[in-house]
Amino acid sequence: MTFRHISQIAGSAMNAQSVRLNTVASNLANAQSASGVEGDTYRARKPVFAAVMGDGSGAGSGVQVLDVVQSTEPLRRAHEPGHPLANEDGVVFYPNVNPVAEMTDMMAASRAFETNVEVMARVKTMQQSLLKLGEG
């Protein structure tokens, strides 16, 4: 596996973690958005990743974002007859976003992103060291 292949893999992983972080941000931003209609209520989203295996040398390997799917977990229902968005039964629907789980996911995605930044930095350092060896 060459430095270029390692950089490609780390770059694709950074892209995947960026999608994950953006999805978490969207979920957290909409966590308290209320609706009087179940079908109009925001539903948590999760990215779906796949490992892409290239040839034996590592070329074409990486992480691919296949899709961003909506959660199938049930929505939160609250009986709030005084709420301006309550339906005729006094029910308000809230997203199925779990802020604690989202924050945990955000920390894991952030750490994974940082790890891949470190990989890229080390590859660059090793490449520079190899160039210096070639000069001497």
Image (cartoon, rainbow, N blue to C red):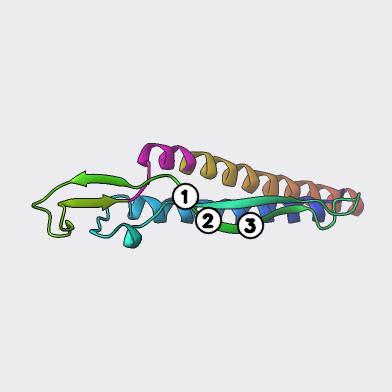
Residue hosting label 2: 69
Residue visible at 43% across and 38% down? 101
Please identify, in this view, whether the residue under mark 3 or under mark 1 is nearer the observer: 1
**Disc number for residue 65:** 3
Amino acid on which disc 3 is placed: Val
Residue hosting label 1: 71
Instruction: Tell me the distance, in whole angstroms, between the alpha carbons under discs 3 and 1.
Output: 17 Å
Label 1 crowding class (10 Å Cα cut-off): few <14, some 14-19, many 20+?
some
Is residue 58 within the magenta segment? no
The spot of residue 122 in percent (x, y) is 71, 45
Residue visible at 47% across and 56% down? 22
The spot of residue 113 in percent (x, y) is 58, 47
Q: Do the CB atoms of the residues marked 2 and 1 lie less than 8 Å apart?
A: yes
Please tell me which residue lies in front, 80 or 131: 80
The spot of residue 90 in percent (x, y) is 15, 52
Instruction: Tell me the distance, in whole angstroms, between the alpha carbons under discs 3 and 2.
Output: 11 Å
Is residue 102 within the magenta segment? yes
Q: Which residues are magenta?
A: 95-105
Instruction: Tell me the distance, in whole angstroms, between the alpha carbons under discs 2 and 1.
Output: 7 Å
Q: Main secondary structure of the magenta part?
A: helix
Amino acid on which disc 2 is placed: Val
Residue visible at 27% across and 60% down? 37
Please identify, in this view, whether the residue under mark 3 or under mark 2 is nearer the observer: 2
Amino acid on which disc 1 is placed: Ser
